[in-house]
Image (cartoon, rainbow, N blue to C red):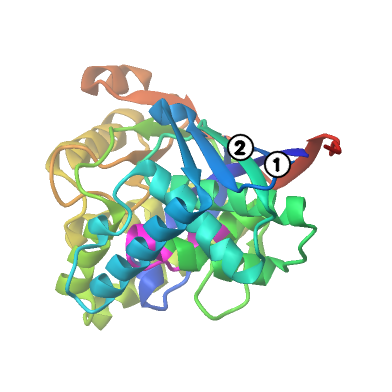
């Protein structure tokens, strides 16, 4: 049996970092899919072959080997939880995320005995704050659920994906997997029901400033150490998100731009926006009357910060070319995960 699952990317309009401190966030699914092709063949032996197209890697592991590797990952995660290890030491290679996903799925449902072939290909700019880790996790989990005829509610799928994502980022708010599961534009807050926000046409652009030197986990830790107990800071983020929802509902583009700018100012204050990227954003405002902000964890080192959202009437191609940044139109994806059987199961 073979399945093909695709999962969109995500973009946070408001609430990066703040969502980890019981603040609401606005997040949208966008049309940059991650694809997982998963094929199962019954056998008396059990193994997994993983092809990571974006990294030009292919791995094959017997069952006992990858299980042992995952037990090591879980031990390192426990050390991180007890502040005796760094989050980047938990999953050290791209293939580790795939193996850890298999490991956590098997805690709920034993894998069928046989040969598993998994091929991951992502159209997402990896490591740019677009939810690429959550997309990989969900594309594989959904494939496995399909292969095992296993029933799992959206809420349970979200909880499982969030648990796995913690191994990658240290602490997961759940906003990435929630956005990818449900699609469209969501207002998300931990421990509260997810609220859908009516989709409006957004004249916007997605700009790649380059992969940040620091990981999401490192940025999360930096903000935690410097700002976790600053109630005034998180109150400011709450207000911005509330105002953005109002502006979006009223289709008020001027108000929307105003509060996007306010959001960027707060992110700069957190220390996760490199000076070069802030200079670029200032240029977008002055030259294009745009409103722009980083969308993701940002970076606490180097000159790059992942993706920037730019809301403007005209595409800022000229300024992007000056900075060496790639720019593309932003396309909202109203649907979440898609998964199809593309080949009937064959008897051996």
Question: Can residue 220 be seen by looking at this rendering?
Answer: yes
Residue at the image point whose x is 50% and y is 53% from the top? 134
Q: Which residues are magenta?
A: 166-177
Q: Quadrant of residue 201?
A: top right
Residue 203 x/y as whole percent: 53, 35
Residue at the image point whose x is 56% and y is 71% from the top? 159
- Work out how far the residue at label 1 is from the one at label 2, CA to CA, in angstroms: 6 Å
Q: How many marks?
A: 2
For the C terminus, the image quarter is top right
Label 1: which secondary element: strand
Q: Please say whether residue 172 is one of the residues in the magenta stretch.
A: yes
Q: Going by the image, does 164 lie left or right of 319?
A: right
Residue at the image point whose x is 67% and y is 46% from the top? 114
Q: Nearer the viewer, residue 66 or 232?
A: 66
Residue 97 x/y as whole percent: 43, 51
Residue at the image point whose x is 63% and y is 76% from the top? 193
Residue 73 x/y as whole percent: 34, 61
Q: Nearer the viewer, residue 190 or 74?
A: 74
Residue 117 - label:
2
Q: Nearer the viewer, residue 322 or 307?
A: 307
Q: Please say whether residue 32 is one of the residues in the magenta stretch.
A: no
Residue bearing mark 1: 40
The residue furthest front is 44
Q: Are marks 1 and 2 in contact (CB under 8 Å)?
A: yes
């Amino acid at each position: 049996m073979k399945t093909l699952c695709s999962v969109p990317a995500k973009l946070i309009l408001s609430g990066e970092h703040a969502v980890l401190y019981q603040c609401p966030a606005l997040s949208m699914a966008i049309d940059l899919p991650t694809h997982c092709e998963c094929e199962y063949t019954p056998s008396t032996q059990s193994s997994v072959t993983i092809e990571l197209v974006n990294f030009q890697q292919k791995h094959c592991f017997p069952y006992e080997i990858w299980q042992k590797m995952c037990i090591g990952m879980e031990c390192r995660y426990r050390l991180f939880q007890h502040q005796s290890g760094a989050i980047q030491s938990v999953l050290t290679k791209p293939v580790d995320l795939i193996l850890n996903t298999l490991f956590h799925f098997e805690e709920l449902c034993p894998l069928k005995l046989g040969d598993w072939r998994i091929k991951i290909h992502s159209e997402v700019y990896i490591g740019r704050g677009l939810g690429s880790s959550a997309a990989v996790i969900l594309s594989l989990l959904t494939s496995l659920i399909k292969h095992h005829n296993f029933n799992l509610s959206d809420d349970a799928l979200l909880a499982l994906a969030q648990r796995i994502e913690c191994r990658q980022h240290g602490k997961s708010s759940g906003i990435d997997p929630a956005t990818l599961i449900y699609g469209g534009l969501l207002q998300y807050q931990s421990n509260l029901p997810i609220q859908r926000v009516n989709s409006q046409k957004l004249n916007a652009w997605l700009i790649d400033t380059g992969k940040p030197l620091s990981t999401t986990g490192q940025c999360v830790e930096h903000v935690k150490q410097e700002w976790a107990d600053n109630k005034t800071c998180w109150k400011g983020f709450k207000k911005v998100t509330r105002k953005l929802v109002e502006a979006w509902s009223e289709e008020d583009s001027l108000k929307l731009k105003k509060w996007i700018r306010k959001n960027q100012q707060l992110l700069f204050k957190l220390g996760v926006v490199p000076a070069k990227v802030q200079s670029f954003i200032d240029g977008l405002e002055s030259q294009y009357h745009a409103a722009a902000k980083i969308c993701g964890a940002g970076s606490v080192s180097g000159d790059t910060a992942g993706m920037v959202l730019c809301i403007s009437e005209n595409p800022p191609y000229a300024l992007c070319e000056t900075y060496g940044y790639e720019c593309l139109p932003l396309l909202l994806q109203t649907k979440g995960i898609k998964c199809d059987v593309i080949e009937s199961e064959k008897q051996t």
